Image: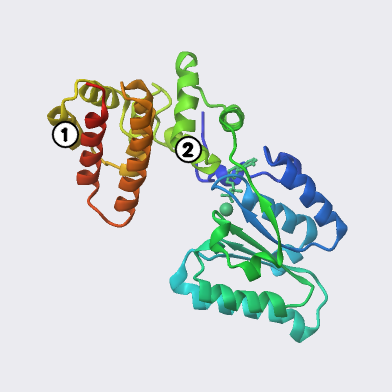
Amino acid sequence: MTLNLDVPWVEKYRPKDFDDIVSQNIVINNLKDFVMSGNMPHMIFTGPAGTGKTSTALIIAKSLLKGDHYYRDLLELNASDTVRMGYVRGVIKDFVNQNMIIGEKSLKIVILDEADNIPNQVQQALRRIIEKTSNQVKFILMCNYINRIIDPIISRCAVFRFVSLSKEMIIERLKYITKQEKLKIPGKSSEDFFETLFFISGGDLRKAINTLQSAVALELLENLDINEILKISGFVDKPTLNDLFEAILAMDFIRTKEILIEVENFDSRNFIRQIIGLLPKLKIEQKEIIYLYNFLGKIDYRISQGADEHIQILALMAEIINKMSK
Ligand SMILES: Nc1ncnc2c1ncn2[C@@H]1O[C@H](COP(=O)(O)OP(=O)(O)O)[C@@H](O)[C@H]1O
Ligand SMILES: [Mg+2]
């Protein structure tokens, strides 16, 4: 079996048509009307990562900009790089001004990804650009958190909310790719394999597809090594998680610490997700569970602010053991 792993599968299996976009029926039906009407508004696509925002924007561009125009009249930018924000602004300005200078009447589309990372002041500048451009230039802004976009921009755009994909949808898509790529997955563990990919993805289909492709590239499929897949994705393998569970159950903090120290490539964000899965299996009263969820949020915040991961996670372990019914 020869595999071509050069092409990222997220690109190879990117939806080509509105009908290939799954789970976003409300958005897609409304969009079809707008796009067909010939007078598309500026738009904001908002929602979690890997739910089809970029794919949808590219489909719109493809259907409106025919042939050469697709390359000439589409500008795709990522705003996450705030250092180059001045550059981004400059490029947008030049692009939208082309129409005014040569008096061209052809439609132009600007796709601006991760717009919620643009600092407020720069958003103000962007808003002025949007206001001033001719009717022939349409903006599609994409973001995970719409509350980070300033109101004057929101009010100039039609907002489309992309929803998380269900576990079934993600697994179905992975199975489809598995079939297309003629991958052999040992039958008895195949459900466990797809469940694990879904867990790792956290609902992000791009991540799920990338993990599948990495597993193939690293030849982890032949003797299907699910623990290795968890590890390369920055999660704790199942035996270790199980040991940890036993140690917490025995309220043995020292042992818990020993196990955690042994973990390589520790990723606290991922670890917290695995711990959340353990909580319901421990003997903890409901009100303490709610307390622990809040505490988890605090720990996550502190880590995001640069606190030492290991110390924070150990504090979390201690708190969990504390809250268990004696
Ligand atoms: N709703 C969807 N339907 C079909 N495929 C999807 C969908 N959402 C994501 N994907 C898959 O995940 C990959 C990333 O999607 P993308 O549109 O870039 O997500 P986003 O821009 O929302 O982060 C695509 O290549 C595609 O294969
Ligand atoms: Mg995207």
Q: Is residue 224 above or below residue 298?
A: above
Image x and y of residue 173, in percent? 60, 32
Identity of the residue furthest to the top in this view: 188
Up-down: is 168 above or below 90? above
Disc 2: CA contacts within 10 A as few (<14), some (14-19) or many (>=20): many
Residue 179, image quadrant: top right
What residue lies at 25% left-to-right and 54% top-to-bottom?
307
| First in sequence: mark 1 vs mark 2 | 2
- Mark 1 or mark 2: which is in front? 1
Which residue shows up at 79% across the image and 62% down it?
40
Horizontal side of 224 relative to 326 (left or right) equals: right
Q: Secondary structure at mark 1?
A: helix
Is ligand 1 closer than 8 angstroms to the Cβ of mark 2?
Answer: no
Circle 1 residue: 257
From the viewer's perspective, tell me whether residue 53 is left or right of residue 204.
right
In which image quadrant can residue 265 be found?
top left
Q: Quadrant of ligand 1?
A: top right
Total labels: the figure holds: 2
Residue 22 position by quadrant: top right
Mark 1 belongs to which amino acid? Lys
Tag 2 residue: 201
State whether residue 17 appears in this view. no
**Residue pushed farthest left?**
254
Q: Nearer the viewer, residue 204 or 292?
A: 292
Which residue: 43% across, 26% down?
A: 221
Q: Residue at x 81, y 72 (%)?
A: 106
Q: Tell whether 298 sits left or right of 76.
A: left
The amino acid type, in three-letter code, at marker 2 is Ser
Q: Secondary structure at mark 2?
A: helix
Apparent side of residue 115 relative to residue 153 in the rendered image (left or right): left
Answer whether residue 204 is visible to the viewer in this image: yes
